Image: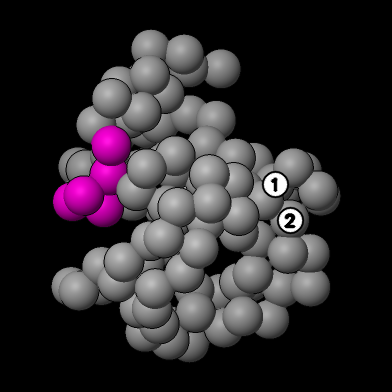
Amino acid sequence: MFKVIDEEFECENCKRQVPKLGYSCRNHCPYCLFSKHVDIEPGDRAEECHGLLEPVGIETDSKKGYVIIFKCQKCGKIRKNKMAEDDDMTKIIELSVNKN
């Protein structure tokens, strides 16, 4: 079941302080787009891996808009999450140009 968790955190990749999103759950850093592999289901914090999720691609969804594709640097699993309103658009464009 989806759990709403919107809290500040320090990005483990770029070390910047990441603010709460305010309208949904913060899933990734808006500055470097990295995330952390902590959920099996959104918000459950049940994943044991805890590796860094590297943004490796982008896709578009007619309902969600831009969706970031992440690959875990530790276990290799692929995860996806929609772009947040405050994400660095330059990073989003770079992902769309550098599609795998």
Residue 51 in the image: x percent, y percent? 73, 56
Image quadrant where one finds the C terminus = top right
Can residue 70 be seen at all in this image of the molecule?
A: no
Q: Is residue 34 above or below residue 98?
A: below
Above/below status of 57 relative to 15: above
Q: Nearer the viewer, residue 11 or 74?
A: 11
What's the magenta bit mostly, secondary-structure-wise? loop
Secondary structure of residue under mark 2: loop
Residue 62: percent from left, percent from top:
19, 42
Q: Are marks 1 and 2 in contact (CB under 8 Å)?
A: yes
Q: Which mark is residue 72?
A: 1
Q: Residue at x 45, y 52 (%)?
A: 16
Distance of label 1 from label 2 (alpha carbons): 6 Å
Mark whose residue sits in front, 1 or 2: 2
Residue sitting nearer the eye, 52 or 82: 52
Q: Please tell me whether residue 22 belongs to the stretch shown in magenta.
A: no
Sequence-wise, the earlier of marks 1 and 2 is: 2
Stretch in magenta: 84-88
Q: Amino acid at mark 2?
A: Gly
Q: Quadrant of residue 45?
A: bottom right
Q: Is residue 81 visible?
A: yes
